[in-house]
Image (tube, rainbow, N blue to C red):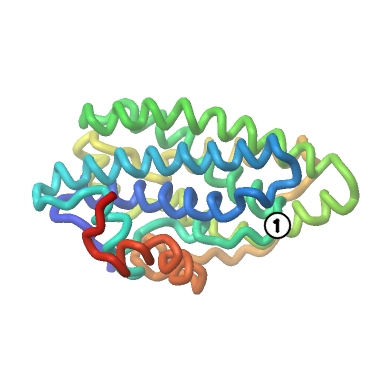
Amino acid sequence: MKTITTNTDLGTYLVRLGDDNLILAQRLGEYIAGAPELEEDLAIANTGLDHLGIARHLFTLAGEIEGDGRSEDDFAMLRPERSFTNALLVEQPNTDFAYIMVRQLFFDAYQVPLWRRLSASNSTDLAGIAAKGLKEATYHLRRSSSWIVRLGDGTAESAMRTQAAIDGLWRYTAELVTSDDLEERLASSGLAPRSSDVASEWLSTIDAVLEEAMLARGSDPFQTFGGRSGIHTEYLGPLLAELQWMQRSYPGATW
């Protein structure tokens, strides 16, 4: 059973995309001041801000479509864990720098073809958000790809850590490119593509980067799902506690 987060299909889909970007932004924010060099520290911070900005636009549009007066803050700060519908991949912890970059590569390679297709959505508001997202995701993919090649073709240690990250995160990738009934309904209305529509491009991008990096796809065939239905790993709850504690402790607080 899929989690319904708004009273419309499009609103629920927008929240899904917003959740992906919000949770990844929070993960990246946790790593600020932990990167191996100052330039990369700034790049991670800016990437997180890009994802946060897109999430804000998506939540705001979802609230407008829903018409119940919910704001971006309501979607981000006042929902419990089971009502978040982000993909499991983005909530995975910052194990080390290699994990962060592999997670980013997997997500960037999905977002580029997704935003490209959403740029042609029958919803002009969503198409506008997607056009902005495409520009940012294209840069993100260039950066994450270059890092994976650099790590895979670097030292024995960097290659080993990066392959371990690929092996560990691979089980969370199929969820990104698997469609459900919500997407089928939106696709029939020309509002959004099916996630499966981007699967071949996503995999081709991943394979090209891994080949150049002299790394391999994850060999474990097992894939895990649940994020789109509100069933998450043990990592999301603590992340939300950190994200939401101010609003939860001081409801309605303003600056």
Q: Is residue 231 left or right of residue 68?
A: right
Tell me: residue 72, above or below residue 153: below
Q: Is residue 159 left or right of residue 245?
A: right
Residue visible at 42% across and 68% down in the picture: 241
38 and 193: which one is in front?
38
Q: Taking the image as drawn, is residue 182 in sight?
A: no
Q: Residues within 10 Å of mark 1 (few under 14, many from 20)?
A: some
- Residue 94 screen position, x and y as percent: 62, 58
The amino acid beneath tag 1 is Asp
Residue marked by disc 1: 96
128 and 3: which one is in front?
128
- Residue 215 screen position, x and y as percent: 77, 46
Residue visible at 54% across and 59% down in the picture: 172
Q: Secondary structure at mark 1?
A: loop
Residue visible at 56% across and 28% down in the picture: 139
- Residue 65 screen position, x and y as percent: 14, 43
Q: Image quadrant of residue 40?
A: top right
**Residue farthest bottom in this picture:** 234
